[in-house]
Protein backbone atom coordinates (compact mmCIF):
# COMPACT_ATOMS: atom_id res chain seq x y z
CA UNK A 1 0.00 0.00 0.00
CA UNK A 2 2.78 2.34 0.96
CA UNK A 3 4.71 1.57 -2.14
CA UNK A 4 1.60 2.14 -4.21
CA UNK A 5 1.08 5.58 -2.76
CA UNK A 6 4.72 6.37 -3.27
CA UNK A 7 4.56 5.28 -6.87
CA UNK A 8 1.43 7.37 -7.44
CA UNK A 9 3.12 10.33 -5.87
CA UNK A 10 6.14 9.92 -8.07
CA UNK A 11 3.88 9.45 -11.02
CA UNK A 12 1.99 12.64 -10.21
CA UNK A 13 4.90 14.86 -9.31
CA UNK A 14 7.25 13.29 -11.80
CA UNK A 15 5.17 13.97 -14.88
CA UNK A 16 3.35 17.06 -13.66
CA UNK A 17 5.97 19.63 -14.62
CA UNK A 18 5.81 18.23 -18.15
CA UNK A 19 2.76 20.35 -18.84
CA UNK A 20 4.62 23.55 -18.15
CA UNK A 21 6.49 23.31 -21.42
CA UNK A 22 3.15 24.03 -23.14
CA UNK A 23 2.98 27.52 -21.70
CA UNK A 24 5.55 29.15 -24.03
CA UNK A 25 3.83 27.29 -26.84
CA UNK A 26 0.46 28.76 -25.91
CA UNK A 27 2.13 32.12 -25.50
CA UNK A 28 3.49 31.99 -29.03
CA UNK A 29 0.19 30.72 -30.38
CA UNK A 30 -1.52 33.76 -28.85
CA UNK A 31 1.10 36.12 -30.28
CA UNK A 32 0.75 34.60 -33.74
CA UNK A 33 -3.03 34.83 -33.51
CA UNK A 34 -2.88 38.52 -32.58
CA UNK A 35 -0.35 39.31 -35.31
CA UNK A 36 -2.43 37.52 -37.94
CA UNK A 37 -5.52 39.39 -36.82
CA UNK A 38 -3.74 42.75 -36.91
CA UNK A 39 -2.25 42.03 -40.32
CA UNK A 40 -5.65 41.01 -41.63
CA UNK A 41 -7.21 44.18 -40.35
CA UNK A 42 -4.65 46.50 -41.95
CA UNK A 43 -3.37 44.18 -44.63
CA UNK A 44 -6.66 44.15 -46.44
CA UNK A 45 -5.16 46.97 -48.43
CA UNK A 46 -1.90 45.25 -49.23
CA UNK A 47 1.53 45.14 -47.67
CA UNK A 48 2.35 48.77 -48.49
CA UNK A 49 -0.53 50.03 -46.34
CA UNK A 50 1.16 51.58 -43.34
CA UNK A 51 -0.65 53.41 -40.59
CA UNK A 52 0.61 56.85 -41.63
CA UNK A 53 -0.72 56.27 -45.11
CA UNK A 54 -4.05 55.11 -43.72
CA UNK A 55 -4.44 58.31 -41.70
CA UNK A 56 -3.49 60.34 -44.75
CA UNK A 57 -6.00 58.46 -46.90
CA UNK A 58 -8.75 59.13 -44.39
CA UNK A 59 -7.98 62.84 -44.22
CA UNK A 60 -8.00 62.96 -48.02
CA UNK A 61 -11.29 61.04 -48.23
CA UNK A 62 -12.85 63.42 -45.70
CA UNK A 63 -11.70 66.51 -47.55
CA UNK A 64 -9.36 67.77 -44.83
CA UNK A 65 -6.52 67.81 -47.35
CA UNK A 66 -6.72 68.18 -51.12
CA UNK A 67 -5.17 66.02 -53.82
CA UNK A 68 -1.91 68.01 -54.02
CA UNK A 69 -1.42 67.94 -50.28
CA UNK A 70 -2.21 64.22 -50.21
CA UNK A 71 0.41 63.52 -52.88
CA UNK A 72 2.99 65.73 -51.20
CA UNK A 73 2.57 64.19 -47.79
CA UNK A 74 2.45 60.67 -49.18
CA UNK A 75 5.76 61.18 -50.96
CA UNK A 76 7.28 62.49 -47.73
CA UNK A 77 6.01 59.43 -45.84
CA UNK A 78 7.41 57.07 -48.46
CA UNK A 79 10.69 58.96 -48.50
CA UNK A 80 11.03 58.46 -44.76
CA UNK A 81 10.07 54.80 -44.95
CA UNK A 82 12.99 54.02 -47.25
CA UNK B 1 -44.75 67.05 -48.90
CA UNK B 2 -43.29 69.66 -46.62
CA UNK B 3 -39.62 70.35 -46.42
CA UNK B 4 -36.99 72.98 -46.06
CA UNK B 5 -38.71 76.31 -46.06
CA UNK B 6 -37.21 79.69 -45.53
CA UNK B 7 -39.31 82.65 -44.62
CA UNK B 8 -38.38 86.25 -45.02
CA UNK B 9 -38.02 87.87 -41.62
CA UNK B 10 -40.37 90.53 -40.46
CA UNK B 11 -38.57 93.86 -40.56
CA UNK B 12 -36.41 94.29 -37.52
CA UNK B 13 -36.32 90.64 -36.42
CA UNK B 14 -33.03 90.02 -38.18
CA UNK B 15 -32.01 86.74 -39.72
CA UNK B 16 -33.90 84.17 -41.69
CA UNK B 17 -35.28 81.02 -40.24
CA UNK B 18 -36.03 77.82 -41.99
CA UNK B 19 -38.00 75.00 -40.49
CA UNK B 20 -38.36 71.39 -41.48
CA UNK B 21 -41.55 69.34 -41.31
CA UNK B 22 -43.09 69.51 -37.86
CA UNK B 23 -42.03 66.81 -35.46
CA UNK B 24 -39.32 65.24 -37.58
CA UNK B 25 -35.85 65.61 -36.13
CA UNK B 26 -33.56 67.33 -38.60
CA UNK B 27 -30.49 65.37 -39.72
CA UNK B 28 -28.53 68.60 -39.45
CA UNK B 29 -29.22 72.21 -38.65
CA UNK B 30 -27.51 75.59 -38.56
CA UNK B 31 -28.64 78.03 -35.88
CA UNK B 32 -27.74 81.69 -36.38
CA UNK B 33 -24.58 80.45 -38.07
CA UNK B 34 -22.13 83.27 -38.67
CA UNK B 35 -18.66 82.99 -40.12
CA UNK B 36 -16.43 86.02 -40.37
CA UNK B 37 -13.03 85.92 -42.04
CA UNK B 38 -10.49 88.50 -41.00
CA UNK B 39 -12.47 89.31 -37.88
CA UNK B 40 -12.09 92.78 -36.42
CA UNK B 41 -10.26 94.33 -39.33
CA UNK B 42 -11.69 96.57 -41.98
CA UNK B 43 -11.43 93.73 -44.47
CA UNK B 44 -13.66 91.40 -42.43
CA UNK B 45 -15.81 89.29 -44.72
CA UNK B 46 -19.05 87.80 -43.44
CA UNK B 47 -19.08 84.52 -45.37
CA UNK B 48 -22.11 83.39 -43.37
CA UNK B 49 -24.38 86.00 -41.87
CA UNK B 50 -26.79 84.66 -39.27
CA UNK B 51 -28.05 81.65 -41.21
CA UNK B 52 -30.62 79.37 -39.61
CA UNK B 53 -31.74 76.34 -41.54
CA UNK B 54 -32.77 72.74 -40.91
CA UNK B 55 -32.08 69.78 -43.15
CA UNK B 56 -34.84 67.23 -42.44
CA UNK B 57 -34.12 63.51 -42.55
CA UNK B 58 -34.71 61.67 -45.78
CA UNK B 59 -34.64 64.78 -47.94
CA UNK B 60 -32.50 65.98 -50.83
CA UNK B 61 -31.62 69.67 -50.52
CA UNK B 62 -29.66 71.77 -53.00
CA UNK B 63 -27.87 74.87 -51.73
CA UNK B 64 -27.44 77.42 -54.50
CA UNK B 65 -26.10 80.90 -54.97
CA UNK B 66 -23.57 82.95 -56.86
CA UNK B 67 -19.89 82.36 -56.13
CA UNK B 68 -18.94 84.07 -52.92
CA UNK B 69 -22.45 83.67 -51.53
CA UNK B 70 -21.21 81.45 -48.73
CA UNK B 71 -22.71 78.17 -49.92
CA UNK B 72 -19.43 76.24 -49.77
CA UNK B 73 -18.61 77.78 -46.39
CA UNK B 74 -21.98 76.57 -45.10
CA UNK B 75 -21.24 73.05 -46.33
CA UNK B 76 -17.75 73.09 -44.82
CA UNK B 77 -19.16 74.22 -41.48
CA UNK B 78 -21.85 71.51 -41.61
CA UNK B 79 -19.05 69.02 -42.28
CA UNK B 80 -17.02 70.23 -39.32
CA UNK B 81 -14.21 71.17 -41.71
CA UNK B 82 -14.52 74.78 -40.67
CA UNK B 83 -15.73 76.36 -37.45
CA UNK B 84 -18.25 79.16 -36.98
CA UNK B 85 -17.50 82.59 -35.56
CA UNK B 86 -20.83 82.40 -33.72
CA UNK B 87 -23.95 80.29 -33.79
CA UNK B 88 -24.36 76.53 -33.80
CA UNK B 89 -24.12 73.60 -36.18
CA UNK B 90 -25.98 70.50 -35.05
CA UNK B 91 -25.53 67.14 -36.79
CA UNK B 92 -27.52 64.15 -35.59
CA UNK B 93 -28.33 65.95 -32.35
CA UNK B 94 -24.70 66.80 -31.56
CA UNK B 95 -23.55 70.42 -31.37
CA UNK B 96 -20.29 70.41 -33.35
CA UNK B 97 -18.91 73.37 -31.43
CA UNK B 98 -19.13 71.52 -28.11
CA UNK B 99 -17.25 68.43 -29.30
CA UNK B 100 -13.59 67.69 -28.64
CA UNK B 101 -11.31 67.15 -31.62
CA UNK B 102 -11.52 63.41 -31.12
CA UNK B 103 -15.31 63.38 -30.86
CA UNK B 104 -15.51 65.55 -33.96
CA UNK B 105 -13.23 63.16 -35.86
CA UNK B 106 -15.41 60.21 -34.86
CA UNK B 107 -18.62 62.02 -35.77
CA UNK B 108 -17.17 62.97 -39.13
CA UNK B 109 -16.05 59.40 -39.72
CA UNK B 110 -19.26 57.67 -38.71
CA UNK B 111 -22.10 60.07 -39.32
CA UNK B 112 -21.16 62.36 -42.18
CA UNK B 113 -20.56 61.24 -45.74
CA UNK B 114 -18.69 63.44 -48.21
CA UNK B 115 -18.61 63.76 -51.96
CA UNK B 116 -16.21 66.22 -53.57
CA UNK B 117 -15.88 67.80 -56.95
CA UNK B 118 -12.45 66.17 -57.32
CA UNK B 119 -13.60 62.68 -56.12
CA UNK B 120 -10.75 62.33 -53.56
CA UNK B 121 -10.27 58.61 -54.17
CA UNK B 122 -7.08 56.94 -52.97
CA UNK B 123 -5.23 56.02 -56.18
CA UNK B 124 -3.52 52.89 -54.80
CA UNK B 125 -6.75 51.25 -53.65
CA UNK B 126 -9.35 49.42 -55.74
CA UNK B 127 -12.91 50.73 -56.00
CA UNK B 128 -14.08 48.27 -53.33
CA UNK B 129 -11.24 49.24 -50.97
CA UNK B 130 -12.00 52.91 -51.48
CA UNK B 131 -15.66 52.32 -50.67
CA UNK B 132 -14.90 50.39 -47.47
CA UNK B 133 -12.08 52.72 -46.42
CA UNK B 134 -14.13 54.61 -43.77
CA UNK B 135 -15.11 51.27 -42.19
CA UNK B 136 -11.63 49.79 -42.36
CA UNK B 137 -10.19 52.82 -40.58
CA UNK B 138 -12.87 52.52 -37.90
CA UNK B 139 -12.05 48.81 -37.51
CA UNK B 140 -15.53 47.82 -38.58
CA UNK B 141 -16.60 45.16 -41.03
CA UNK B 142 -18.84 46.22 -43.87
CA UNK B 143 -22.49 45.24 -43.56
CA UNK B 144 -22.50 43.05 -46.64
CA UNK B 145 -26.17 43.52 -47.48
CA UNK B 146 -25.89 47.31 -47.24
CA UNK B 147 -22.64 47.30 -49.22
CA UNK B 148 -24.24 45.23 -51.98
CA UNK B 149 -27.28 47.51 -52.03
CA UNK B 150 -25.15 50.65 -52.39
CA UNK B 151 -22.95 49.10 -55.05
CA UNK B 152 -26.05 47.99 -56.97
CA UNK B 153 -27.59 51.46 -56.57
CA UNK B 154 -24.58 53.18 -58.11
CA UNK B 155 -24.09 50.38 -60.67
CA UNK B 156 -20.52 49.46 -59.79
CA UNK B 157 -20.78 45.71 -59.28
CA UNK B 158 -18.48 44.90 -62.22
CA UNK B 159 -15.94 47.62 -61.44
CA UNK B 160 -15.05 46.79 -57.84
CA UNK B 161 -11.56 45.51 -58.62
CA UNK B 162 -10.59 48.50 -60.75
CA UNK B 163 -8.35 51.26 -59.49
CA UNK B 164 -9.45 54.89 -59.88
CA UNK B 165 -7.08 55.41 -62.83
CA UNK B 166 -8.92 52.66 -64.69
CA UNK B 167 -12.29 54.32 -64.20
CA UNK B 168 -13.95 57.25 -65.96
CA UNK B 169 -14.71 60.43 -64.05
CA UNK B 170 -18.35 59.44 -63.71
CA UNK B 171 -17.41 56.00 -62.38
CA UNK B 172 -14.93 57.53 -59.93
CA UNK B 173 -17.62 59.82 -58.60
CA UNK B 174 -19.94 56.82 -58.24
CA UNK B 175 -17.26 55.17 -56.09
CA UNK B 176 -17.12 58.36 -54.03
CA UNK B 177 -20.90 58.36 -53.60
CA UNK B 178 -20.81 54.71 -52.48
CA UNK B 179 -17.99 55.54 -50.04
CA UNK B 180 -20.05 58.40 -48.63
CA UNK B 181 -23.01 56.06 -48.06
CA UNK B 182 -21.20 53.01 -46.66
CA UNK B 183 -21.35 54.07 -43.01
CA UNK B 184 -25.10 54.86 -43.29
CA UNK B 185 -24.33 58.44 -42.33
CA UNK B 186 -26.73 60.87 -40.75
CA UNK B 187 -26.15 63.17 -43.69
CA UNK B 188 -24.30 63.12 -47.02
CA UNK B 189 -22.71 66.44 -48.01
CA UNK B 190 -21.69 66.94 -51.62
CA UNK B 191 -19.72 69.96 -52.80
CA UNK B 192 -20.30 70.53 -56.52
CA UNK B 193 -20.43 66.74 -57.11
CA UNK B 194 -20.98 67.18 -60.84
CA UNK B 195 -18.52 70.04 -61.32
CA UNK B 196 -15.86 67.88 -62.98
CA UNK B 197 -18.22 65.70 -65.01
CA UNK B 198 -19.80 65.85 -68.44
CA UNK B 199 -23.56 66.41 -68.36
CA UNK B 200 -24.45 62.75 -68.86
CA UNK B 201 -22.21 61.48 -66.06
CA UNK B 202 -23.39 64.38 -63.92
CA UNK B 203 -27.02 63.39 -64.47
CA UNK B 204 -26.16 59.81 -63.46
CA UNK B 205 -24.55 60.94 -60.20
CA UNK B 206 -27.53 63.15 -59.37
CA UNK B 207 -29.82 60.23 -60.16
CA UNK B 208 -27.87 58.03 -57.70
CA UNK B 209 -28.02 60.68 -55.00
CA UNK B 210 -31.76 60.96 -55.64
CA UNK B 211 -32.15 57.17 -55.27
CA UNK B 212 -30.09 57.22 -52.08
CA UNK B 213 -32.72 59.56 -50.66
CA UNK B 214 -35.86 58.00 -52.14
CA UNK B 215 -34.97 54.31 -51.89
CA UNK B 216 -32.41 54.15 -49.08
CA UNK B 217 -33.84 56.92 -46.91
CA UNK B 218 -30.59 58.88 -46.74
CA UNK B 219 -30.33 62.64 -46.24
CA UNK B 220 -28.38 64.51 -48.90
CA UNK B 221 -27.29 68.15 -49.17
CA UNK B 222 -25.48 69.33 -52.28
CA UNK B 223 -23.90 72.65 -53.07
CA UNK B 224 -24.16 73.47 -56.74
CA UNK B 225 -24.46 76.35 -59.15
CA UNK B 226 -26.10 74.15 -61.77
CA UNK B 227 -29.89 74.69 -61.99
CA UNK B 228 -30.25 71.24 -63.59
CA UNK B 229 -28.64 69.65 -60.51
CA UNK B 230 -31.07 71.47 -58.24
CA UNK B 231 -33.91 69.96 -60.26
CA UNK B 232 -33.16 66.57 -58.64
CA UNK B 233 -33.64 67.97 -55.14
CA UNK B 234 -36.72 68.17 -52.93
CA UNK B 235 -35.88 71.75 -52.05
CA UNK B 236 -33.48 74.45 -53.16
CA UNK B 237 -32.07 77.09 -50.82
CA UNK B 238 -30.62 80.30 -52.20
CA UNK B 239 -27.76 82.13 -50.55
CA UNK B 240 -26.47 85.60 -51.38
CA UNK B 241 -23.82 87.54 -49.49
CA UNK B 242 -23.79 84.99 -46.69
CA UNK B 243 -27.53 85.19 -46.12
CA UNK B 244 -30.32 82.76 -46.80
CA UNK B 245 -32.53 84.76 -49.13
CA UNK B 246 -34.96 82.36 -50.75
CA UNK B 247 -36.12 78.78 -51.10
CA UNK B 248 -38.05 76.64 -53.55
CA UNK B 249 -39.99 73.44 -52.95
CA UNK B 250 -39.73 70.73 -55.62
CA UNK B 251 -37.56 73.01 -57.74
CA UNK B 252 -37.35 72.78 -61.50
CA UNK B 253 -34.29 73.82 -63.47
CA UNK B 254 -36.23 76.69 -65.06
CA UNK B 255 -37.60 77.90 -61.75
CA UNK B 256 -34.15 77.80 -60.18
CA UNK B 257 -32.63 79.68 -63.10
CA UNK B 258 -35.17 82.47 -62.66
CA UNK B 259 -34.36 82.84 -58.99
CA UNK B 260 -30.63 82.84 -59.66
CA UNK B 261 -31.05 85.53 -62.28
CA UNK B 262 -32.97 87.59 -59.76
CA UNK B 263 -30.00 87.20 -57.39
CA UNK B 264 -27.60 88.32 -60.07
CA UNK B 265 -25.79 84.98 -60.15
Image: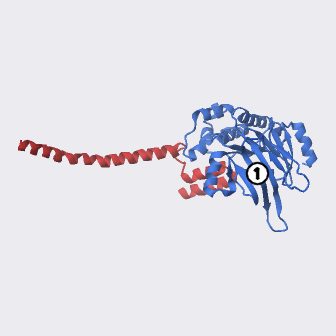
- Residue B257 point in image, percent of width and height: 90, 41
Q: Is residue B122 visible?
A: no
| Chain letter tied to blue | B
Above or below, B241 against B169 in this view is below
Left or right: A51 with respect to B255? left
Where residue B104 appears, x then y in whole percent?
A: 64, 53
Residue B43: quarter of image? bottom right
Colouring scheme, one of rainbow, by chain, secondary structure, one colour? by chain
In which quadrant will I find the N terminus of chain B? top right
Chain identifier of the residue bearing label 1 in the image: B
Density class for disc 1 (Cα within 10 Å; few <14, some 14-19, many ≥20) is many
Decide which of A2, B24 is in the foreground and name it: B24
Give the residue number, with chain letter if any, for mark 1: B30
In this rendered view, identify the residue nearer to me: A71 or B76: B76
Secondary-structure class at tag 1: strand
In the shown orientation, is residue B263 left or right of residue A45? Answer: right
Q: Is residue B62 visible?
A: yes
Picture residue at 67% right of the left edge, 57% below the top: B98
Instruction: Residue B250 in the image: state x and y as whole percent.
Output: 84, 36
Identify the image quadrant of residue B206.
top right
Q: Residue at x 72, y 47 (%)?
A: B28
Q: Residue at x 49, y 43 (%)?
A: A40
Give percent across and percent down for residue B140.
55, 43
Q: Colour of chain A?
A: red
Amino acid sequence: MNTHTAILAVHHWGHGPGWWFLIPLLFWAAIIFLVVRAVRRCGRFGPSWRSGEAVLAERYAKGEIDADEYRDRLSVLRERAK
Amino acid sequence: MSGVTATRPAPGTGGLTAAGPGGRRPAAAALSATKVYGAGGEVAVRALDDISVEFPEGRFTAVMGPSGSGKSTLLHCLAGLDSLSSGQIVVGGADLGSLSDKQLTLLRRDRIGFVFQSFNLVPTLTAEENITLPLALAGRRPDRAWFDEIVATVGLADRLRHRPSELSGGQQQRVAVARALVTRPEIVLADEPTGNLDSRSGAEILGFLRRAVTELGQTVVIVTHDPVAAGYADAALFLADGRLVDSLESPTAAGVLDRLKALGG
